[in-house]
Image (tube, helix red, strand yellow):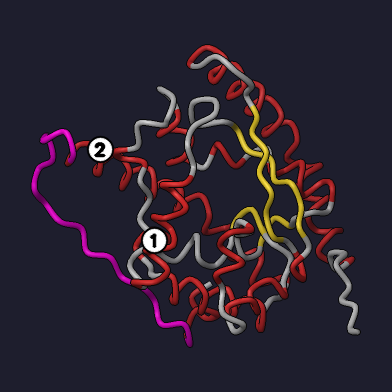
Amino acid sequence: MLVFETRLPRSKRVVDLGILLCTAPIWLPLMALVTGLIKVASRGPAFYRQRRIGFRGKEFMIFKFRSMHVNAETHAHEQYVEQLMMADSPMTKLDASDPRLIPCGRFLRATGLDELPQLFNVLRGDMSLVGPRPCTVVEYQRYRPEHRARVNAPPGLTGLWQVNGKNSTTFSEMIAMDIFYVENRSLSLDLGIIWKTFPAILRQTRESSDAVRARSGKASGETVACHTPSFERLGERI
């Protein structure tokens, strides 16, 4: 029986820990601020844990800031994700109309602040700063064998998919980007993805705001063209 190494590569660990230590004066106070915001907005714990699939298929518990009401139902979301996978439709979130979100939940999710506690997953060695997003156990069970190649790189807080369309891309496009990263990962590619993450978050926040305005009938009616880059040139663009 083959046994796969599930520890993160040493070079990746050195880069991850170096960046985290240098930026700790920024993200630690920010996490304290978000914790207080959640406590004011909703009763219950500020943090949320969920089982995810990590490097080489190893399961781990991911940390997130809670953006939904305590004991919120998750079956509908699982069905929604399955439908997107089967139809190969853009991976649009339900956030604009999701009643499970706490008052500040939509903002936390749009800005990616709900993912900040995953920095502790990076410190623990469960994740890296850059890599394919770790999927849920249910999603992984629905993957075809070729899809599972995306776990051959350590899961990341940000990645190629996040900075190249994310919600405007289909499931197959996401898989293609993740496998491209697996086959071409390097320090220069990681640094390029980190550099492009913050502009991508700003775009995602704006798109989320537009979706909320459109749902409330206050949208201007303008359409925004989305462009998904050619996978063959992704390395050049990063």
- Image coordinates of residue 222 in percent, x first then y, are 11, 51
Residue 108 in the image: state x and y as whole percent: 48, 34
Q: Helix, strand, or loop for circle 1? A: loop
Q: Residues within 10 Å of mark 2 (few under 14, many from 20)?
A: some
Residue for point 46% across, 48% down: 201
In space, the residues marked 1 and 2 are separated at their CA atoms by: 17 Å
Q: What amino acid type should be assigned to the residue bearing mark 2?
A: Val
Image marks 1 and 2: residues in contact by CB distance under 8 Å? no
Please say whether residue 226 is one of the residues in the magenta stretch: yes
Q: Residues within 10 Å of mark 1 (few under 14, many from 20)?
A: some
For the magenta stretch, what is the residue range?
A: 215-232
At horizontal 60% and vertical 33% (from top left) the residue drawn is 65
Residue type pointed to by label 1: Met
Side (left or right) of 139 relative to 169: right
Q: Is residue 149 magenta?
A: no
The residue located at (62%, 24%) in the rendering is 46
Residue under circle 1? 91
In the rendered view, tell whether residue 93 sits above or below residue 133.
above
Q: Nearer the viewer, residue 40 or 227?
A: 40
Quarter that holds the N terminus: bottom right
Q: Position of residue 116 (x, y in %)?
A: 63, 39
Q: Which marked residue is nearer to the observer: mark 1 or mark 2? A: 1
- Viewer-side residue, 134 vs 187: 134
Outermost residue to the bottom: 232
Question: Badge 2 is on which residue?
Answer: 212
Query: Chief secondary structure of the magenta span?
Result: loop
Viewed as shown, does residue 221 lie left or right of 86? left
